[in-house]
Image (cartoon, rainbow, N blue to C red):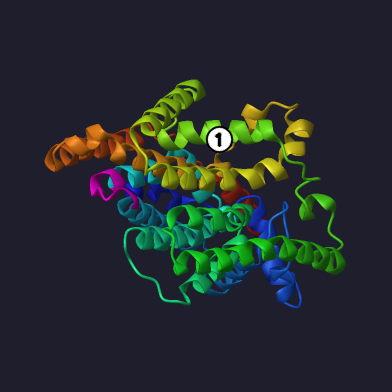
C-alpha cells in the first residue's frame, strides 16, 4: 500500500534548500564544518553526515536520493505495523493502522523534499525504540544494556530534525507508561532521561559553535526567534488528526468529534488501555511541539496569525499523526465489541477497509510536484 502510493517521489528533483546543502557539502572546508551547520533551528549533524555520504555516492543524480527516502519510509511503515501489532495483539488492526499512516497524502510534503529527509530518519529512530518498548510490554525481553542503545538511537534522531528533539524529550514518559514495573523500566527511564537532559545542552552547544564558526544570522540558528505558540500546536494537532487518522477527507471538527467519542467510549469501557493511549498521544504532541515552538513567531510575522494556514504545510505532518493512529488502533482493539467479534469477521472487515484505503489513496492522490521547474532551471544554468 505505502509503496504503491509513495513511489511517484522517485521522479522528484532537488529544490530550494537541497541546492544550498549540495553547495555546502562541496565547499565547506574542512568537511566537518558542514556537519555543524544548523538551519531553521534544527540540529542536523546526523542528517548532514547522511547528505555528505549520499553526495559522495550519488553525486547530483536525484534518483538514488529519493530511492533512499522511499526505502526509509517503507521501513517506518513496517515499524508502525510492528508497534501496532504488539500493542493491539491484532494484526489486521495493525495492518490498517500502518496503511492509514503510510498512505496519507500529507506524507508527500516530507518524502518529496530531500532536505526534509532528516524528519524521516528521526521518525525511524523513534519508531525503533517504540517497537522495542512495545515488545517488552508484550512479554519480550531486553538485554541489560539495551536501554543504552535506545538512548543512542534517540540522540542520533535528535540531530536529524527538530521532531527528533521532541521524541527524545518525551520518550522517558512513554517508556514509563508502556513498560510494566520492573528493573527494565527503571533502567530505561534512567537512560532515556539522561538523553532528555543532554539534548537541550547539546542544542545550546551546537548553536554556540555554529554562531562562532559561521556567524550565521538568527533565523538559521533559532528558527526566527523561537517562541512557543499554543494556538499553532492545536492547529497542527487538528490537521494531523484529519490527515493522519481520517485521510484528510473530513474537516477538523469531524475529526475531533470522532477522536473524542472514541476516547470517551474507551475510557468508560476499559481500565488497562489508557496507558498506551496516553503514551501514543504524547508522542504526537512531542512531534508537533518543536514546530509550534520554532514557527510560532513565523506564523505571526508571515501569516498574520492565521495558524490554520501554516498548520496545513504538509512537511509538518509526517511524524505527528503516527501517535494518533496508534492510539486509535489500541482503542479499537480494546473495545468490548472488537473482542466479541470473531477473528475471521474482524480480519475480513479490516482487510476490506485496507483495500478501500489503498484505492482511495491512489485514486484521490493529489498531483505530485516533481520539482520540474527546478530541474529546468538547473538544465538552463548548465547549458549557459
Reply above or below: 111 against 207: above
Among the 4 quarters of the image, the one containing residue 268? top left
On the picture, is 140 further left or further right than 122? Answer: left
Reply above or below: 313 against 160: above
Q: Position of residue 297 (x, y in %)?
A: 77, 37
Q: Please tell me whether residue 89 belongs to the stretch shown in magenta.
A: yes
Reply above or below: 268 against 317: above
Mark 1 lies on residue: 237
Q: Please tell me whether residue 179 belongs to the stretch shown in magenta.
A: no
Q: Which residues are magenta?
A: 87-94
On the picture, is 301 further left or further right than 239? Answer: right
Q: Is residue 192 visible?
A: yes
On the picture, is 287 further left or further right than 307? Answer: left
- 266 or 112, which is in the foreground? 266
Q: Position of residue 120 (x, y in %)?
A: 51, 55
- 376 or 176, which is in the foreground? 176
Looking at the rendered structure, the secondary structure element under dot 1 is helix
Which residue occupies 55% across, 58% down?
Answer: 172
Amino acid at each position: 500500500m505505502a509503496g504503491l502510493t509513495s513511489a511517484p517521489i522517485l521522479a522528484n528533483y532537488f529544490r530550494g534548500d537541497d541546492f544550498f546543502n549540495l553547495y555546502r557539502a562541496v565547499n565547506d572546508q574542512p568537511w566537518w564544518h558542514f556537519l555543524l551547520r544548523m538551519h531553521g533551528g534544527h540540529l542536523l549533524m546526523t542528517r548532514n553526515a547522511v547528505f555528505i555520504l549520499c553526495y559522495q555516492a550519488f553525486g547530483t543524480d536525484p534518483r538514488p536520493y529519493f530511492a533512499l527516502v522511499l526505502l526509509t519510509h517503507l521501513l517506518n511503515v513496517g515499524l508502525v505495523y510492528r508497534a501496532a501489532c504488539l500493542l493491539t495483539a491484532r494484526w489486521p488492526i495493525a495492518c490498517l493502522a500502518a496503511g492509514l499512516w503510510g498512505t496519507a497524502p500529507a506524507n508527500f510534503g516530507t518524502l518529496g523534499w530531500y532536505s526534509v529527509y532528516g524528519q524521516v530518519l528521526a521518525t525511524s529512530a523513534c519508531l525503533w525504540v517504540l517497537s522495542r518498548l512495545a515488545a517488552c510490554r508484550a512479554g519480550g525481553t531486553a538485554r541489560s544494556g539495551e536501554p543504552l542503545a535506545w538512548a543512542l538511537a534517540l540522540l542520533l534522531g535528535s540531530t536529524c530534525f527538530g521532531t527528533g528533539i521532541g521524541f527524545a524529550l518525551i520518550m522517558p514518559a512513554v517508556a514509563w507508561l508502556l513498560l510494566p514495573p520492573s528493573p527494565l523500566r527503571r533502567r530505561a527511564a534512567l537512560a532515556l532521561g539522561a538523553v532528555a537532559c543532554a539534548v537541550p545542552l547539546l542544542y545550546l552547544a551546537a548553536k554556540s559553535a555554529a554562531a562562532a564558526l559561521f556567524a550565521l544570522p538568527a533565523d538559521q540558528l533559532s528558527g526566527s526567534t523561537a517562541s512557543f505558540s499554543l494556538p499553532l500546536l492545536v492547529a497542527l494537532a487538528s490537521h494531523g488528526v484529519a490527515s493522519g487518522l481520517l485521510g484528510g477527507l473530513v474537516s477538523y471538527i469531524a475529526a475531533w468529534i470522532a477522536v473524542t467519542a472514541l476516547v470517551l467510549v474507551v475510557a468508560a469501557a476499559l481500565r488497562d488501555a489508557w496507558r498506551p493511549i496516553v503514551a501514543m498521544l504524547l508522542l504526537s504532541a512531542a512531534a508537533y511541539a518543536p514546530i509550534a515552538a520554532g514557527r510560532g513567531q513565523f506564523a505571526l510575522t508571515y501569516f498574520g496569525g492565521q495558524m490554520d494556514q501554516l498548520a496545513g504545510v504538509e512537511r509538518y505532518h509526517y511524524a505527528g499523526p503516527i501517535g494518533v493512529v496508534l492510539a486509535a488502533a489500541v482503542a479499537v482493539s480494546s473495545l468490548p465489541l472488537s473482542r466479541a467479534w470473531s477473528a475471521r469477521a474482524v480480519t475480513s472487515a479490516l482487510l476490506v477497509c485496507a483495500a478501500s484505503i489503498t484505492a482511495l489513496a491512489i485514486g484521490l492522490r493529489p498531483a505530485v510536484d516533481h520539482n520540474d521547474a527546478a530541474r529546468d532551471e538547473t538544465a538552463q544554468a548548465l547549458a549557459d
